[in-house]
Image: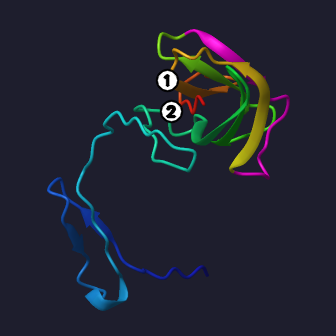
Amino acid sequence: MKRFAVIGLLLVGCSGSATQSSSIPSSTVPVTTSPATTSPETTTPATTSPETTTPPGSADCPEVVAVELRQTAVGVFTVTTTVRSVDVEGVSFADAWEVRDLAGSVLGTRILTHPHANEQPFTRSLSDVPIPPEVSLVEVDARDSARGFCGASLTVEVPHS
């Protein structure tokens, strides 16, 4: 004979408030609610890990979570990018990331040849990326092997010296 234990039922209404089944004392089930939020566009110049904007429906898409630009010569940079992705071997994985100016021109592409399922998030660099002096901001975007460019990108300031 199989036995089942009823632990409790948590219902969340449209108003965002939580209602708990009366069979469990309220102190045994912590409930955290947060207001619904939208995903505003963010532009964060930095070489740290700023917040990114995740497009709707992109939960399994790779997202760029940090970018560092290091100038190695006049107008030439090494771009180090950290990507978080849901990599499933044989299904989809983050297979590249691109550096673009804000007009959409590709300045550099780092190809990723295998899934990084056991290394999340992961960081890779691309050397010798030409960024003209008149370009003050670049966008770095990661590509999924099955869905293309679908996740959160990051816009950063170019540290021309």
Name the residue tied to disc 2: 157
How packed is label 2: few (under 14 Cα within 10 Å), some, or many (20 or more)?
Answer: some
Q: Position of residue 155 (x, y in %)?
A: 49, 31
Name the quadrant of the N terminus: bottom right
Q: Position of residue 131 (x, y in %)?
A: 63, 18
Of the two numbered discs 1 and 2 on the same chain, state the one appearing first in sequence: 1
Q: Is residue 17 left or right of residue 75?
A: left
The one of 81 and 93 positioned closer to us in this rendering? 81
User: Is there any visible trace of residue 133 in the rendered image?
Assistant: yes
**Towards the viewer: 144 or 96:** 96
- Left or right of 16: which side holds 93? right
Magenta region: which residues?
105-120
Q: Is residue 107 magenta?
A: yes
The image shows residue 128 at horizontal and vertical percentages of 78, 22
Report the residue marked by disc 1: 136
Q: Name the residue rendered at 30%, 90% in the picture.
A: 27
Residue at the extreme right of the image, as rendered: 113
Type of the residue with mark 2 = Glu
Q: Quadrant of residue 149?
A: top right
Q: Nearer the viewer, residue 77 or 23?
A: 77
Discs 1, 2 touching: Cβ within 8 Å: yes
Q: Compared to 66, does 4 lie above or below? A: below
Amino acid at circle 1: Ser
Q: CA distance from mark 1 to mark 2?
A: 6 Å
